[in-house]
Image: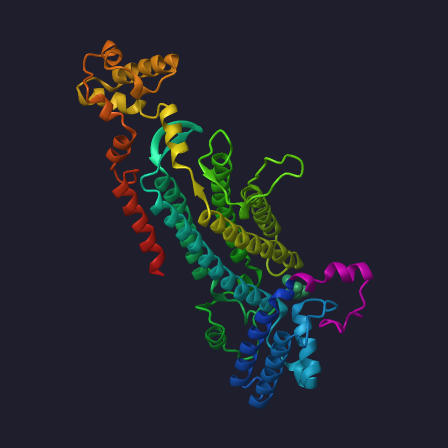
């Protein structure tokens, strides 16, 4: 029976019935719905709105339904309109007419918002843990590659040498910000909507503080109209998850480039690669490509949520039922993306020799020729021109900068001495970049320690 049949016949047009139902989506809230109801009914008992024995009996019934669902003795009935109707109907089956008292001083409007918050705060906690695993995998690989010199790029053109550890730690920093955003989110989501009822509170002497404590919320939402209309906690999570996905997508793009033949910097493990049905030599980075495209999906989900809310007047409108499919999808998608990415990092093969070769061939030490001259009193602009000429000479001769003779150097400036070769040695270049945030070994070790410390804080 429909919860709302009474004035209306409750018999919907077949298509309208199918269209209106949300059970296929919101069934995953079933345990939160039951737990939320247990808190509500306990309060009804202690506030004297229900007799203590009635409250206890309803709670027993709800616990029984939960146990049966866990045992598989009961499954969610997809004929129900939504998860709230399913639980209430089951309760009436379980304990009889007394079950009809459960919904006193409550509406599905405050109920659904409470259920969804309970679900999302738990899921965001799980995502935090997965983010930490991802960060740990990045840092472990970074620690193994503190001396692995690789080209750093701007415009995807070889720029200056960095280390693989430095590059990986950059992604750890992004993930650390994501973690901090989730932490902020978890504080804001944790305000209780229940007790707002349909929109205007209730005449019953409810105790919202008690429900807040029973359900593990930090505060009670202070305005009942806001409480049932607010979906900030969906929009905010969609934003945070989209940003996580964008970061993973950028890293995926790097893995795809680095594992391609002209680069060959890394090898993605076979466990995370697929072959081609026609080209026997192919090993494709499908997982990285999928993560890159899942970011588009998350941004789509985020956009859907924002557009859904933007024109809604207060208070509840059925539009809000559409908040769940996309946020559930975002949660599921981000979780698997993080797990797959962590696995790829843990099994990644690093080809340090290819990275070093690319540094040499890319003239990445050109800046350091200029800096060498600056140290000998030449103005940076002039030094830059001299270095550029030397790069041109080396390119024309098909040589690296370290392979040019001292005579060639001296032709461009008499400031060059034998120590130029040490100054443009890639190891020296990286080792000297000790400025805070830079690629020198001890500096990257400090960055790694900073991230480790931040993730062990909470
Ligand atoms: N299934 C609904 C949702 O997800 C529950 C709230 C229904 N409230 C209402 N007044 N029709 O939003």
Q: Is residue 331 above or below residue 167?
A: below
Provide residue 77's location: percent of width, then percent of height: 71, 70
How many numbered marks have been drawn onto this rendered protein structure? 0
Q: Quadrant of residue 44?
A: bottom right
Q: Quadrant of residue 146?
A: top left
Front residue of 34/68: it is: 68
The residue sitting at the front extreme is 280
Provide residue 399's location: percent of width, then percent of height: 36, 17
Residue drawn at x 38%, y 42% is 170
Can residue 221 be seen here?
Answer: no
> Which stretch appears magenta?
1-25
Front residue of 400/122: it is: 400
Q: Is residue 292 above or below residue 161?
A: below
- What colour-coding does the image apply? rainbow
Q: Quadrant of ligand 1?
A: bottom right
Q: In which quadrant is the N terminus drawn?
A: bottom right
Indicate yes or no whether the magenta region holds residue 255. Answer: no
Q: Is residue 102 above or below residue 183?
A: below
Front residue of 212/378: it is: 378
Can residue 310 be seen here?
Answer: yes
The residue sitting at the top extreme is 411
Question: Is residue 164 found left or right of 318 in the rendered image?
Answer: left
Q: Main secondary structure of the magenta part?
A: loop
Residue drawn at x 57%, y 39% is 284
Q: Quadrant of residue 8?
A: bottom right
Provide residue 365's location: percent of width, then percent of height: 31, 25
Q: Is residue 17 above or below residue 440?
A: below
């Amino acid at each position: 029976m429909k919860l709302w049949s009474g004035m209306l016949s409750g018999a919907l047009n077949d298509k309208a019935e199918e269209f209106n139902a949300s059970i296929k989506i919101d069934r995953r809230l079933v345990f939160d719905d039951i737990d939320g109801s247990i808190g509500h009914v306990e309060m009804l008992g202690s506030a004297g709105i229900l007799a203590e024995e009635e409250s206890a009996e309803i709670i027993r019934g709800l616990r029984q339904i939960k146990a049966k669902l866990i045992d598989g003795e009961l499954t969610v009935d997809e004929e129900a309109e939504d998860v709230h109707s399913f639980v209430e109907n089951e309760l009436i089956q379980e304990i009889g007419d007394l079950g009809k008292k459960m919904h006193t001083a409550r509406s599905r409007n405050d109920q659904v918002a409470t259920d969804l918050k309970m679900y999302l705060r738990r899921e965001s906690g799980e995502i935090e843990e997965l983010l930490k695993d991802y960060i740990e995998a990045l840092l472990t690989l970074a620690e193994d590659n503190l001396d692995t010199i690789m080209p750093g790029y701007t415009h995807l053109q070889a720029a200056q040498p960095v280390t693989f550890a430095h590059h990986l730690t950059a992604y750890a920093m992004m993930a650390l910000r994501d973690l901090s955003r989730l932490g902020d989110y978890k504080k804001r989501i944790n305000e209780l909507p229940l007790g707002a009822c349909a929109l205007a509170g209730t005449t019953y002497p409810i105790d919202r503080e008690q429900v807040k404590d029973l359900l593990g919320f930090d505060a009670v939402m202070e305005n009942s109209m806001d409480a049932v209309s607010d979906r900030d906690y969906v929009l905010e999570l969609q934003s945070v998850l989209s940003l996580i996905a964008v970061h993973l997508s950028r890293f995926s793009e790097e893995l795809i480039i680095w594992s391609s033949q002209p680069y060959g910097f890394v090898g993605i493990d076979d466990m995370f690669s697929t072959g081609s049905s026609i080209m026997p030599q192919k090993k494709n980075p499908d997982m990285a490509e999928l993560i890159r495209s899942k970011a588009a999906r998350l941004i789509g989900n985020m956009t859907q949520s924002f557009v859904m809310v933007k024109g809604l007047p207060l208070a509840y409108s059925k539009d809000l039922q559409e908040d769940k499919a996309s946020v559930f999808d975002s949660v599921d998608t981000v979780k698997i993306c993080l797990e797959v990415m962590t696995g790829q990092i843990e099994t990644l093969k690093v080809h340090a020799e290819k990275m070093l070769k690319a540094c040499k061939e890319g003239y990445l030490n050109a800046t350091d020729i200029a800096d060498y001259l600056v140290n000998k009193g030449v103005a940076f602009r002039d030094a830059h021109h001299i270095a550029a000429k030397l790069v041109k000479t080396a390119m024309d001769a098909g040589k690296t900068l370290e392979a040019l003779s001292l005579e060639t150097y001296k032709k461009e400036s008499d400031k060059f001495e034998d120590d130029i070769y040490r100054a443009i040695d890639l190891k020296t270049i990286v080792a000297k970049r000790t400025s805070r945030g830079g690629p020198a070994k001890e500096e990257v070790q400090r960055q790694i320690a900073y991230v480790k410390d931040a993730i062990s804080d909470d």
